[in-house]
Amino acid sequence: MASPRKKVIPKLGPRSPATGRGRVNAIRISEDIQAQVAAWARRQSDKPSLSEAIRQLLERALSNAESSGQRSQTGARLAEKLAAREIEGMVDQSHPKAEQHRRKRRLLKGPGEFREMRGDQPKRK
């Protein structure tokens, strides 16, 4: 009786280091976008792999998305300052300063009925 033959399993070469403990996700990317990501990766000093380049780009996009709310608020403040400057040039000087200030504020903030509807303003307590 012949002895059973052992199955020979070839050893694999060195593996790539793990990039993290996150779940593996498969995504479908067009060749055009993949080429753009690869070109971006080649321009980086650390020369990331395609998957690492996608991770880096996603992280950048998400951090920009989180801070874009702050940027739009800054733009709103700038618009308010510009509007205030224009209103000051058009104000009726015959009225008392308190009345001028009240009218300017009403123009900048809008009528109370509409202020309650605005999502970009803090709610009154």
Image (cartoon, rainbow, N blue to C red):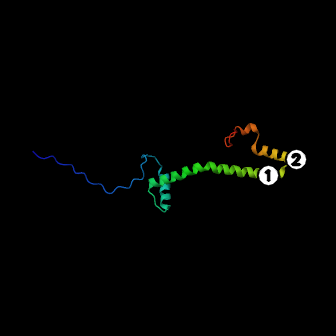
Label 2: state its secondary structure: loop
- Left or right: 70 as drawn, with respect to 39: right
Q: Residues within 10 Å of mark 1 (few under 14, many from 20)?
A: few
- Left or right: 18 as drawn, with respect to 35: left
Residue furthest left as drawn = 1
At horizontal 70% and vertical 50% (from top left) the residue drawn is 77
At horizontal 42% and vertical 51% (from top left) the residue drawn is 20
x and y percent of residue 30 in the render? 48, 49
Up/down of 122 relative to 51, above or below: above
x and y percent of residue 90 in the render? 84, 50
x and y percent of residue 78 in the render? 71, 52
Quarter of the image for the C terminus: give it. Answer: top right
Q: Nearer the viewer, residue 39 or 120?
A: 120
The residue singled out by tag 2 in the image is 96
Q: Nearer the viewer, residue 43 or 15?
A: 15
Q: Residues within 10 Å of mark 2 (few under 14, many from 20)?
A: few
Disc 1 residue type (three-letter):
Glu
Label 1: state its secondary structure: helix
Residue furthest front as drawn = 125
- Left or right: 116 as drawn, with respect to 27: right
The tag earlier along the polypeptide, 1 or 2, is 1
The residue singled out by tag 1 in the image is 86
Q: Number of numbered discs present?
A: 2
Residue furthest top as drawn = 113
Q: Nearer the viewer, mark 1 or mark 2?
A: 2
Up/down of 41 relative to 118, above or below: below
Disc 2 residue type (three-letter):
Pro
x and y percent of residue 2 in the render? 11, 46
At horizontal 25% and vertical 51% (from top left) the residue drawn is 9
Quarter of the image for the N terminus: give it. Answer: top left
